[in-house]
Amino acid sequence: MVVRAEIPIGGAVYRARVAMAPIGRVAVQVPHTDGFDLALAWTDRSNTDPRPPRFDDSYLVETNDVALASAWLDFDARTALLASRYVSAPNPRNTAVLLRDGTWSHELKAGEITARRLEAEPSSERIADMLAASLALASRPARWAQWFAKLARVIGGEASSRVEIGGKPVLRVRRGAVDVTVRVLRRLDPDEHGRLRTLIGARRLGSSGDTLTLISDDLPRAAWPPPNAPGAPRLRIEDQASNLLDTARPSTSIVRPHDIEITFDGAVTDANRLGAAIELAARWADDSAPVGPYR
């Protein structure tokens, strides 16, 4: 029998399915993962192996995006996974005995977090443990969005309630007549394999057709964006834009005839760099945009 539930957490509702037989299985929906895959399976080591006192590395991680996997497995997610690892056992003394349970594996694929074992799960308490761990993984985008919400309050923007990988913008900033958006995604082109990126975008106003392509020296060739069409006049980088580029240090800066895309390889954790990139996109989109904190 499959039990379905809608579970509210932090203003969002998570749809879940749980089953105890014929195999134990928990599934929680996660929208917009942009082809991201993550699998977690437990592996045990010898008790004589050295182990950091505050971290248990006894799970094996498989993923198609190492940077995004690292960002997704934050402190809350790791803590919930480790808590779900242990199960109490009978003990003749008046103390609790916790044993490691390595029968469950966890996976994020095709917009769904799943936890399962290869046989039936007789304990409803263990199903509840796996549901709690799955919800901690599924709600990571909401915790991630809290960082952008703090930035939005500083620079006068509007943040989304969760990060959607390849979905709607996580942050919107208005500068004069220009709307600047910040998105987290993996693929600039549908045919590429994908890697975690932070993308700042804006539509150009009254463009003269000039273009610009700047690519960081250390960016792997596989992460380069599609080139601009040849023959267009080159956008001049004036002093204020140059200062913003020095502060932001983006991986790529692409100015096309009708839009702008500034990308960071991976997740941005420096508010000054991201804020400078937002102001740079606004300046390039419209020279008459009002002066912001970085200009």
Image (spheres, grey):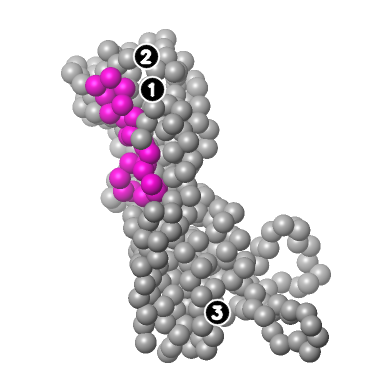
Residue 259 in magenta stretch: no
Q: Residue type at mark 3?
A: Arg
Q: Are marks 2 and 3 in contact (CB under 8 Å)?
A: no
Asked if residue 177 shows in the view, the reply is: yes
**Among numbered discs 1 and 2, the one appearing first in the sequence:** 1
Q: Are marks 1 and 2 in contact (CB under 8 Å)?
A: no
- Residue under pointer 2: 291
- Residue at left offset 51%, top offset 75%: 128
Badge 1: how crowded within 10 Å, few (<14), some, or many (20+)? many
What mark, if any, has residue 279 been given in the picture?
1
**Among numbered discs 1 and 3, the one appearing first in the sequence:** 3
Disc 1 to disc 3, C-alpha distance: 50 Å
- Please say if 100 is above or below 80: below
- Residue under pointer 3: 126
What mark, if any, has residue 206 been given in the picture?
none
x and y percent of residue 202 in the render? 28, 29
- Residue at left offset 56%, top offset 53%: 74
Disc 2 to disc 3, C-alpha distance: 56 Å
SS at circle 2: loop
Figure quadrant of the C terminus: top left
SS at circle 1: helix
272 sits to left or right of 165: right
Q: Quadrant of residue 204?
A: top left
Disc 1 to disc 2, C-alpha distance: 9 Å
- Residue at left offset 81%, top offset 85%: 93
- Residue at left offset 49%, top offset 40%: 147
Residue range of the region highlighted in magenta in the rendering: 159-182
117 sits to left or right of 1: right
